Amino acid sequence: MNGAPDEALVELDAVTVRYRDEAILEGVTHSVHRGDYVTVTGRSGAGKSTLLNVIAGTVFPSAGTVRVCGHDLGRSGPRTQAHRYAIGYLFQSAHLVSWMSVAENVLLGMRYQRVDRAEGRRRTGEALEAVGLAHRMDHRPTQLSGGERQRAALARAIARDPQVILADEPTGNLDAATGSSIIELIESLSAGRCLIVVTHDEALAARGTRRWTVGELGVHELTRTAP
Amino acid sequence: MTEALRSLLARPRVLVTGVAMVVVAVTAMTLIPSLTHSAGAKLLADLDALGSDAWLVEPQPAPDGLPGRLPDGALARAAGLPQVSAALREVTTEVPVRPNAQELSDSGVHVIGLDASGKSSPYPVLSGTARPVPGLPFAVLGERAAEELGVLDLPATVVAGGRRFVATGVIAGDPLLPELADALVVDADTALALAGATASDRLVIRTAAALDAAGIRRSIDPLAHSALAVSQPQALVTAKQQSTSTLDGLAVYASVAAFVIAGLGIAIMLAAAVRQRTAEIAIRRVHGAPRRAVFGLVAAEGLGLGVLGGALGIVVSAVAMYAVAAVNHWPVQPQFALFAAAMGAAIVMCELAAAVPAWLAVRIEPATAFAVE
């Protein structure tokens, strides 16, 4: 993790997303800086996940500019790759590959970053150690509990050494206690990066230093506190 | 490739079914031609025995209406053609034959003159010594001729054209020269001496070489003194060509059909597998996998199926080939080029079959994939 403490890691400039002529987001302009912890709320279908996908580079804006760590999102090719390399993405489901071991799933996150094998193994060990799954690295995902799977997914995300961590309802499939421990883990491992979490959980939403709500085609900042 | 194989191992139904389809296709491609090759070789040998490898060289009639004559040395030159297995000079006469000192009208047995190059007998011998000796009054009888003339014991004396001949053997009719069964066979010069200008002669040449009529004509009569008609027994030649093309066609159609069916099956299976792996592919895309890497992921699985199925298919085919050959007492001639071609075809077929599923995989967009879930 390198860079200035207040460096803008995510910059959205007049971003509009339309799907079949229907606007989902319209003219969104925001920036997120290193150390920011943004929670995003809003009703279902408002465009929260679309916002994360736009930042992740998996949905291309119909208009406007998205920059992550200074990389302007291209529609495809190396620019998109560089953009995606800077991001760690957590989903409601862990989406681990069932026929791979936990360690291989973590390595999969670095597969396309051209991280050399030894470095990949080192980072995998560290990431699994950080999430408390070092002893389960040779297990298959089917042998893990729901919380462990989500921790493995977190290890896969942070092993990439991302500057931006996106989490789309990461505790949605977990019980309260497990979800809470996962959130604490995500927060601790996001130190020095920026973290953007989509959630329906008000308690979780209140933990962020910034709070956005998505609705009326826009993204509105509700609160902003010092990190 | 290792990852592709592990991915296939994780879905044993796809692996087993896909490999089985390739095995069937490769087996069809290698085993059917091999078996038709063996069976066809026997059929073609039978057709050759009937005379499909024969050329007939006949002189045109003389202007006075009498039969023409082959040029001097024609038989020797015919024997010198490439890959000749038999060269015969046959003289057909109307000279009747009767048993010794008996009158027998319309016996139906006539004298035929026959010279053959080489030392072996040109016809199947049933009993006795069956080769006319030039200059000596020895002859052989066709089996029906012997029956007609009442010759039960050998040697026997018969009369033809006022001369006595000692029949030393009995021969069967040759499929190409069935008239021999009804004849007294002497050497060609003797037959000509008996029949005079009314006898007609011709050459029968059997060769495995791909010759043409003009070439044979030039070889038999280099100075072109005679007008020679060169032909083949057309019905047999046509039957041989049809047999060869039918067997080759059967093998090709069976192979193509097996590969098309296998290809469609594998394409459908891999497409279904891609649908099941939507989340995995989407995760790879989220983590920066370029489209070509996703395409390569599915293509590598196709390659894996092709290599595994191709290798196993060749083994199955070889085992089956030797087993069938052993049961039927056929010689086995492994066609390594065919095996290599089958392996290549299996890989190409699997890659083509994987192309559409790979294209479907490339079209998976993470946002859409996770939204659907």
Image (cartoon, rainbow, N blue to C red):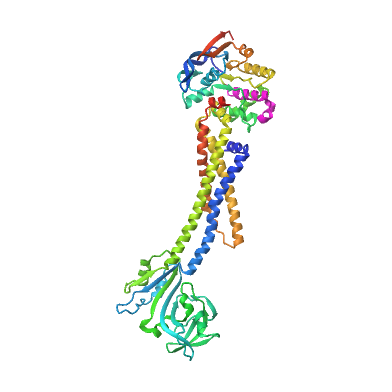
Picture quadrant of residue B262: top right
User: In this rendering, is residue A159 above or below B53?
Assistant: above
User: Measuring 59% from the left and 19% from the top, which residue is drawn there?
Assistant: A167
- The foreground one among B39 and B137 is B39
Q: Which residues are magenta?
A: A133-161
- In the rendered view, does A213 fall on the left or right side of B221? right
Picture quadrant of residue B54: bottom left
Secondary structure that dominates the magenta span: helix
- The foreground one among B143 and A149 is B143
Most distant residue in the bottom direction: B101
- In the rendered view, does A80 fall on the left or right side of B308? left
- In the rendered view, does A190 fall on the left or right side of B101? right
User: Measuring 43% from the left and 66% from the top, which residue is drawn there?
Assistant: B235
User: In this rendering, is residue B242 above or below B351?
Assistant: below
Q: Is residue B293 visible?
A: no
Residue A3 image position (x, y, % from top left): 54, 16
Considering the image in quadrants, where does the C terminus of chain A appear? top right
Is residue B10 on the magenta stretch?
no
Most distant residue in the front direction: B106
Is residue A151 on the magenta stretch?
yes
User: In this rendering, is residue A197 above or below B65?
Assistant: above
Residue B164 image position (x, y, % from top left): 46, 89
Considering the image in quadrants, where does the N terminus of chain A appear? top right
Picture quadrant of residue B217: bottom left
Most distant residue in the left direction: B63
Q: Is residue B359 visible?
A: yes
User: In this rendering, is residue A140 above or below B183?
Assistant: above
Residue A53 image position (x, y, % from top left): 53, 21
